[in-house]
Structure formats: C-alpha cells, structure tokens
Amino acid sequence: MLNAEWPWHRFGVTGVYSSVLMMTGLSINVLGPVGPVLMRHLSASPHSIGSIYSAEGLGNFLGSLLLGPVLSRLRPHAVLVGVSALVFLCLGAVPSCSALHQVASLYLLIGLASGLGNATANTSLTWAWHGAAPQLAAAFNLVNSCFPLGGSAAPLVVLASERRVGNSLAAFSAISVAALLPAAGCALLQPPTAPPPPPEERAEEEKEGAADGSSRAVGGSTVLGIDLGSRRAYVRCTVHAPLLLTTTLCIGAEIAYAAWVYAYAAHHAEMRSDEAAYLSSLYWSAFVAGRRR
C-alpha cells in the first residue's frame, strides 16, 4: 500500500475520488436512457420511473447523513470499498428484477451508497490537500466534475449495450463492473488522515463576546430578532440550511431533466435512440465544460 510519503499520493487519491464520483454519475444517470426499456421489462407505466428516482434521492440523503458516524468509526477508504461493493451488487441485480418495488429497493441502496461515497470522497479530498488551498480548489473542481462526466457517459454505455449485446439492460452489468475500480484504487493507497482540530481561540472569543453582549470577530447569533443561542446555530440556520436546500433542488432538477430529455427526444420528438443518447450525453458534457471554466 502506498502511504502519504509517496510523492504522488495526493494525486493518486484525487484520481480515486474522481472515479467514485464518476461511478455515482454512471449508476444514477443510466436510469434516464434505459428507463423506457426497464419499464417495459417490469411491465410498469413509463411514469413509474419517478418512484425509482425518489427512492434513490431518499437513499442519497440518508447516506450523506451517515457520513459523520461512519467516518468516526471507519477509515475513509474502507468506507469507499464498501460503497463500491454495494453499488456493484445492486446494479448487477437490476436486470434480474421482475417488479418495480425490487428496482426501487435496489436504488434506495444505490442512493445510500452514492450519498455516503460522494461525501466521503469530498471529505477525504480536503484532508489530502490540507494546507494547499489553491491546489485543493482545483482538485475539488476536478473530482466533482466527474459526476456529470459519468452522466455524459451513461447514455453512451446504454447505446453500446444495445448495439453490441442487443439489450440496453446490459448497461447495468457493465457499470456494476466499473464500480469496482474505486475499490481497487482504495486498496492500493493509504487514506489521508484528518488534520488536527483548529486552535480554540475563536471559541474563546465567542464566549467572551456572548458574555458582554457583543461578538468579536465571529459575528452575532440573532436572526429576525430571535437569539439562536450560539454562533454555530446561527451559521447552521443562515448558511448550511439554505445551501442544503439549494443543492438538493438544483441536483434533483439536473438529474430529472437529464432523464426527461432522453424520453422526450425518443418518444415525442421522434429522434432515433442513438440521437437521443447523444443529446443526453451533450447535456451532461455541458456541465463538465462549465466546471472546467
């Protein structure tokens, strides 16, 4: 196992975390182009695919909430190996399902793995590049651009499966095998360790500010005339909560539109399946190009 003393360790773990985000982009966004075939396979209404997306979204949310308790007990790369294994098993089982609730249950687990995997990868990335802020910004941008990169590759994987195997559902099996790549990378590289906690001066300043009714260098704790009791509660309500809501709505809209644009192109605009796949891939490629800017 290559430890942190290896000169290229930071770049190695950045590549591994990029593969984690690409894995989640592939596993989630494959639903759009393969959705019509999957619904026919399950003898379900085309509109029923929304329940699968809802299950995945719920799992993603729950997985993100598990980050703190899980990382306090397990090393980051052990978590990512488990996440990759879970995605491998669940995606590989999708073609053998015969009912909608079975696929929804599998995607609940895939969402759980995706949320936990994405959060773990981004947290470990900040640990790996601790003390190198400019490089961290570039690495963070690179890693997170791999989610839309996976999204742009998903329609092409479905198209290749349809042409080579004659069955679009084979895309699930292909992506499930690719999900093992992050696990291989995690086995080769030692995970970064959490940096030491920051000094306690700011906490002492906050206590002193609360004692005399002011807040030196850290701001207040009042929102709309309501004192929340601490600066930490203030930041959670005025910064974290709005960011969480905005991110949830934006990412949900991105994924929903990607699924809709393929179905619309193929079934309403009467485009060929390959043209619809290229359109969906182009949509996600625009996100990659935007992040690179």
Image: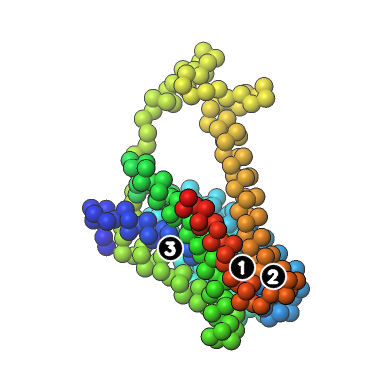
How many tags in the picture?
3
38 displayed left or right of 125: right
Q: In the rendered structure, which disc, 1 or 3, sits on the residue that comes first in sequence? A: 3
| Relative image position of residue 69 (x, y in whole percent) | 48, 49
Residue neighbourhood size for the residue with mark 2, other residues' Cα within 10 Å, grouped as few (<14), some (14–19), many (≥20): some
Contact, CB < 8 Å: mark 2 with mark 1?
Answer: yes
Residue that numbered label 3 is attached to: 19
* Quarter of the figure with residue 29: bottom right
Instruction: Using the image, determine if residue 201 lies above or below residue 127.
Output: above
* Residue picked out by circle 1: 279
Q: Residue furthest top?
A: 212
In the picture of the structure, the residue carrying the numbered disc 2 is 265
Q: Nearer the viewer, residue 201 or 156?
A: 156
Residue 153 drawn at (x, y percent): 52, 69
Query: Residue at coordinates 58% horizontally, 82% vertically from top-left?
Result: 162
Amino acid carrying label 1: it is Leu
**What is the spatial separation of the Cα atoms under label 3 and label 2, in whole angstroms?**
29 Å
- In x, y percent, where is residue 116? 50, 56
